[in-house]
């Protein structure tokens, strides 16, 4: 059967048709220039264009939608009902940049294709297994609880997908595998996965926390924010903007594009070099922390635009970790490929892998599963 996967974002609707029996992507594309990201009418227009290129919809067994925030309730993919839509809408407060567009995409698709079942797959779901010691923020709980303030984590579909493939590549007993997955793209996060279950991840209440990203700083002392508000002319919205779109590699190196940062650093640009050092230091910090939480490490996985493509990035991210069994084979690391592969030196205790992520395929797989169960 075919599953149509929809990723309705604020500036575009990406779509992929996947043959779920063979896991093959038979069609993929994007409609850009959505007028109002949260407008159902604009998404109906975009969805009509998606269907134009899909053509015959009679073979589509279901539509799988990417939804960024599932809150505390959606820990599994669900068949979408009006009640589910309404709950996704209430979660918009937690993900104002993403959930409204995801929801408009869902409402449009359900209006245009009322006869086809639709499934929501949540970016947060893979992290719902975090224990309270991992997801509780140490602030007064009478404030945190009613506002839903806790660690949720994001990129879960990607971490789930690549950790499963890593486990298959490792062989042996999957319930014993200790895996760290590094999703490094414009947005970046890392997850600690024990026996297939996520036990911690670096993004938090929102996708701002954790690693240094293209335009986000990742972890910062929270008092930096109060200090900025107290001592500068910046408003709350200015600071919010600065943290979401004006920090990270962009702030340190003058560009958010990792390729550009590395080429500037190679050409002797000191600020680009510093940006890479800060970026790699933070990754080391998480590799150490998560190895401790996992009680050891069997595999370290690179994915995302940087993780899949930048040999320099992977080298910097793992430099001087031979003492803990992490050592790259320079020849294997330099290989350019879109296939899952091992890049560690033979005989080292940690298998380092590059596994291209495929969130669309994972959404299709999960949607097909939910629909089979619902039938
Ligand atoms: P997003 O988080 O928006 O999905 P991607 O996963 O596509 O982003 O990652 C984008 C990042 O990947 C950019 O910083 C880009 O420079 C980097 N990247 C893409 N291709 C390469 C490459 N061949 N070499 C190094 N970096 C790359």
Image (cartoon, rainbow, N blue to C red):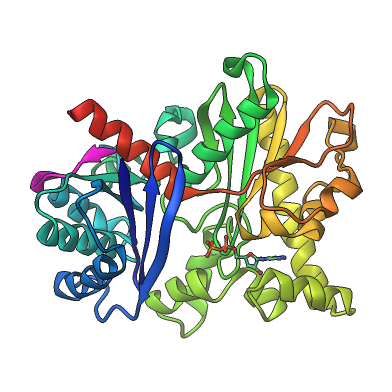
Whether residue 55 sits left or right of residue 299 in the image: it is left
Front-lying residue, 269 or 59: 59
Name the quarter showing ligand 1.
Answer: bottom right
Q: Dividing the image into 4 quarters, which one contains the C terminus?
A: top left
Q: Residue furthest bottom?
A: 233
Q: Which residues are magenta?
A: 76-83
Query: Residue 374's x, y, as percent?
Result: 19, 29
Residue occupying the point 36% across, 37% down: 366
Give the position of the N terminus as an image quadrant. top left
For the point 48% across and 69% down, the residue is 244
Residue 124 visible: no
Is residue 209 among the parts visible in the rendering? yes
Magenta segment: does it hold 255?
A: no
Q: Is residue 207 left or right of residue 328?
A: left
Residue positioned 45% across, 38% down in the render = 22
Image coordinates for residue 73, horizontal then vertical, percent? 25, 37
Q: Quadrant of residue 304?
A: bottom right
Marker count (numbered): 0
Nearest to the observer: residue 58 or residue 179? 58
Tell me the residue at 83%/38% (across/down).
344
Image coordinates of residue 299 in percent, x first then y, are: 71, 31
Q: On the picture, is 359 further left or further right than 305? A: left
| Image spot of residue 114 (x, y percent) | 9, 53
Q: Is residue 16 above or below residue 171?
A: below
Q: Relative to 47, is 313 above or below?
A: above
**58 or 18, which is in the foreground?**
58
Quadrant of the rendered image containing residue 255: bottom right
């Amino acid at each position: 059967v075919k599953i149509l996967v929809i990723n309705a974002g604020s500036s575009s609707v990406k779509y992929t048709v996947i043959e779920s029996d063979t896991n093959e992507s038979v069609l993929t594309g994007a409609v850009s220039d959505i007028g109002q990201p949260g407008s159902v009418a604009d998404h109906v227009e975009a969805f009509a264009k998606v269907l134009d290129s899909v053509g015959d919809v009679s073979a589509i067994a279901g539509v799988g939608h990417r939804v960024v925030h599932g809150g505390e309730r959606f820990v599994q993919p669900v068949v979408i009902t009006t009640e589910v839509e309404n709950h996704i809408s209430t979660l918009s407060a937690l993900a104002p940049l993403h959930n409204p567009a995801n929801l408009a995409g869902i409402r449009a698709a359900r209006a245009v294709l009322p006869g086809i079942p639709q499934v929501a797959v949540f970016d947060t779901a893979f992290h719902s297994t975090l224990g309270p010691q991992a997801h509780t923020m140490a602030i007064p709980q009478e404030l945190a609880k009613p506002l839903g303030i806790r660690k949720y984590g994001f990129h879960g579909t990607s971490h789930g997908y690549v950790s499963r493939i890593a486990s298959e590549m490792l062989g042996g007993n999957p319930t014993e595998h200790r895996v760290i997955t590094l999703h490094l793209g414009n947005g970046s996060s890392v997850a600690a996965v024990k026996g297939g279950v996520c036990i911690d991840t670096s993004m938090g209440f929102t996708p701002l926390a954790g690693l240094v990203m293209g335009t986000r700083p990742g972890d910062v002392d929270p008092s930096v924010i109060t200090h900025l508000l107290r001592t500068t002319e910046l408003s709350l919205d200015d600071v919010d903007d600065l943290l979401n779109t004006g920090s990270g590699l962009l702030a340190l190196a003058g560009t958010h594009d990792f390729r550009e940062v590395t080429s500037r650093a190679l050409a002797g640009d000191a600020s680009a070099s510093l940006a890479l050092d800060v970026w790699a230091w933070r990754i080391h910090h998480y590799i150490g922390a998560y190895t401790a939480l996992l009680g050891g490490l069997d595999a370290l996985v690179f994915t995302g635009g940087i993780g899949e493509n930048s040999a320099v990035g992977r080298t910097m991210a793992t430099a001087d970790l031979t003492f803990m069994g992490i050592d790259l084979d320079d020849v294997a690391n330099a290989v350019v490929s879109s296939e899952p592969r091992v890049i560690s030196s033979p005989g080292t205790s940690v298998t380092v892998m590059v596994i291209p992520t495929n969130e669309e395929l994972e959404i299709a797989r999960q949607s097909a599963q939910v629909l089979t169960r619902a039938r």
